[in-house]
Image (cartoon, rainbow, N blue to C red):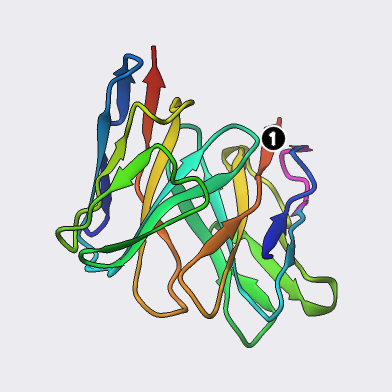
Amino acid sequence: DGGITQSPKYLFRKEGQNVTLSCEQNLNHDAMYWYRQDPGQGLRLIYYSQIVNDFQKGDIAEGYSVSREKKESFPLTVTSAQKNPTAFYLCASRQQGNTGELFFGEGSRLTVL
Amino acid sequence: AQSVTQPDIHITVSEGASLELRCNYSYGATPYLFWYVQSPGQGLQLLLKYFSGDTLVQGIKGFEAEFKRSQSSFNLRKPSVHWSDAAEYFCAVGVRTGNQFYFGTGTSLTVIP
């Protein structure tokens, strides 16, 4: 079945460590997104990519980095510069063009100890 | 700037009662409009979407929503709520000229027997 796979589901990290969250899709979608979700704040855009080897910062990109070397993969690195990284992270994708909705993965919960 | 407002943070309804979740948006043109549902610790699932045409749209799980341009609203409704509808509901706006989406802060629904 086509879909978006995020891993790991749960991740614990010590302060000062970088961590990479994986996002893989087999929907053949061009555009991919990373959102951060905190209680009461909805979803906030971190980065998005419309095509391989290109990506744009979202509203809260500081302390995060991404790469898009393959169409199906869009990993997110949470660096030690991110001051409050504990959150639920959601990856999404959509068909290129203006009418496609976002398809979401199951999310990754990062906890910094 | 585009924005989405969900004025109700939390709603409690009895099983079998009707439901209406409110959503208002701010956008210079007619946007693409979406409602998503999220169970705890899960990703978001699309309930329904509006792009153009009939302003009353039907979705999955018996939900419907009505786009009212004059009120900049896209309220979600269900005539009879089931206990399994308890979840977080997000309204979202898609920008027609780009690839960005804007989410409301969500409405948490509790269903009591």
Residue at the location (60% across, 43% down)?
Answer: A42
Q: Residue at x 44, y 33 (%)?
A: A88
Residue A79 percent across, percent down from the top left: 32, 32
Q: Nearer the viewer, residue A60 or B8?
A: A60
Using the rendered view, name the quadrant where residue B25 is placed.
Answer: bottom right
Q: Is residue B52 above or below residue B16?
A: below
Taking the spot 22% from the left edge, 57% from the top edge, the residue there is A68
The residue carrying pointer 1 sits among few (fewer than 14), some (14 to 19) or many (20 or more) residues within 10 Å by Cα, namely: some
Q: In this image, A103 relative to B77: left or right?
A: left
**Label 1 amino acid?**
Val
Residue B32 appears in the figure:
yes
Residue B22 position (above or below residue B68): above
**Coordinates of residue A28 in the picture (x, y in percent):** 22, 68
Most common secondary structure along the magenta stretch: strand
Residue A32 magenta-drawn?
no
Q: Position of residue B19 (x, y in %)?
A: 76, 51
- Element carrying mark 1: strand
- The residue that disc 1 covers is B111
Q: Quick one: A80 or B75, which is closer to the camera?
A: A80
- Give the magenta part as a residue range: B11-20
Side (left or right) of A55 relative to B102: left
Give whichever of B41, B109 is nearer the camera.
B41
Based on the picture, tell me whether residue B18 belongs to the magenta stretch: yes
Q: Residue furthest right?
A: B70
The quadrant in which the C terminus of chain B is found is top right
